[in-house]
Amino acid sequence: MQIIEEKSADLIDTQGGPGRYAVFGKPIAHSLSPRIHAAFSRQLSIPLEYQAIEASAEEFVGALATFAAAGGRGANVTLPLKQHAARLCLSVSERARQADSVNTLVRRGEGWHGESTDGAGLVRDITGRHGLYVRGRRTLLLGAGGAARAVAFALLDAGVSELTISNRTPEHADTLADAIGQPERVQTRYWTDLGNWGGFDLVINATSAGHSNQSLGLPASLLAARAICYDLSYGKASFGFLAWARSVGAEHAIDGLGMLVEQAAEAFDIWHGQRPETDAIFAELRAYLPGDAED
Ligand code: NDP
């Protein structure tokens, strides 16, 4: 597979007219992406259509081919399709290759180019929107799925001092640590042993447990003073982890709504060559979502 430089100029949509874009996933009905991209389109006067298309893993290849045949120029991909998307691309960026996960597709000739904007979205939200630093932080990453893979590389690039990965299925954490290949900075721990560890300045919940209202059963001893706890999920799915974070003294307990907006802005920039301003749509979505799970 070809590796193409990130945000390469030849990926930008120069065809003119309202381009067709979509987000694929299942379930997808409640996706906020159409609303976010419509706001970016208005802000930068770049006309486009952006729809949500429901597709299971089995349906995805066919649905994407139909979309391409109808003039689709770019797509976002969410659960459970990110690794499937990585498999069907003719070329990918280096960060998508590392993460083995694609959340942004760009039509390029007769095929698709794949990007991963989740990690950049997380780091930009923590550092830009919340004005916090990640450099030098002892970091615990909970989870080893597609999103965890993307954010692990981005956090290391952003300068966390060390990264401890713990996952319900320990083999998946080991696979991720092996793929990163920095044993001096990256280690894994059994979930059941987390009570023996502590002093983390940054704890990232990249599990999907909150979507099924399952408790993570985390010990109270994990956090250092003034720690940041960040849940990649948002809305009700984040409430359990953020409540735990506050109860054990986290200085900041942040949900993933800002990451969602920032990864979308990254995708918009890849497609259109212009990065939208994100504060207005973030504030609109924060007011719309039930509950305020920000610090
Ligand atoms: P995956 O399905 O790829 O991975 C799910 C992860 O959660 C796995 O590590 C899995 O462990 C773990 N897990 C599931 N249930 C439990 C449980 N009950 N207890 C402990 N661990 C559990 O999902 P993604 O990586 O794509 O997404 C993870 C989360 O990140 C989701 O909540 C998603 O909504 C959110 N996300 C948010 C984004 C944003 O922009 N804000 C972007 C992308 C994702 P195991 O390996 O054992 O199965």
Image (tube, rainbow, N blue to C red):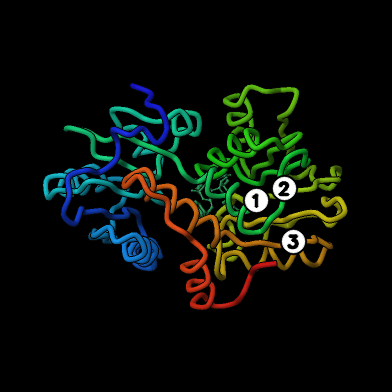
| Apparent side of residue 38 relative to residue 158 in the rendered image (left or right) | left
144 relative position to 40: left or right: right
Q: Number of numbered discs present?
A: 3
In the rendered image, which residue does mark 3 sit on?
A: 252
Side of 245 relative to 260 (left or right): right
Crowding around mark 3 (Cα neighbors within 10 Å: few <14, some 14 to 19, many 20+) is: some
Most foreground residue, 156 or 5 = 5
Residue 133 numbered tag = 2
The secondary structure type at the circle numbered 2 is loop
Distance between the alpha carbons at the discs numbered 1 and 3: 13 Å
Residue 87 versus residue 69 in the image, above or below: above
Query: Distance from label 2 to label 1 (Cα)?
Result: 5 Å
Q: Is residue 134 above or below residue 17?
A: above
Within 8 Å of ligand 1, the CB of disc 1? no
Question: Do residues under tags 2 and 1 come within 8 Å of each other at their CB atoms?
Answer: yes
Q: Position of residue 228 (x, y in %)?
A: 74, 55
Q: In which image quadrant can residue 165 be found?
A: top right
Name which residue type carries label 1.
Thr
- The mark that comes first in sequence, 2 or 1, is 1
Q: Which residue is at a point 59% across and 31% down the rendered structure image?
A: 176
Residue 155, by quadrant, is top right
| Quadrant, the N terminus | top left
Going from the N terminus, do you reach mark 1 or mark 3 first? 1
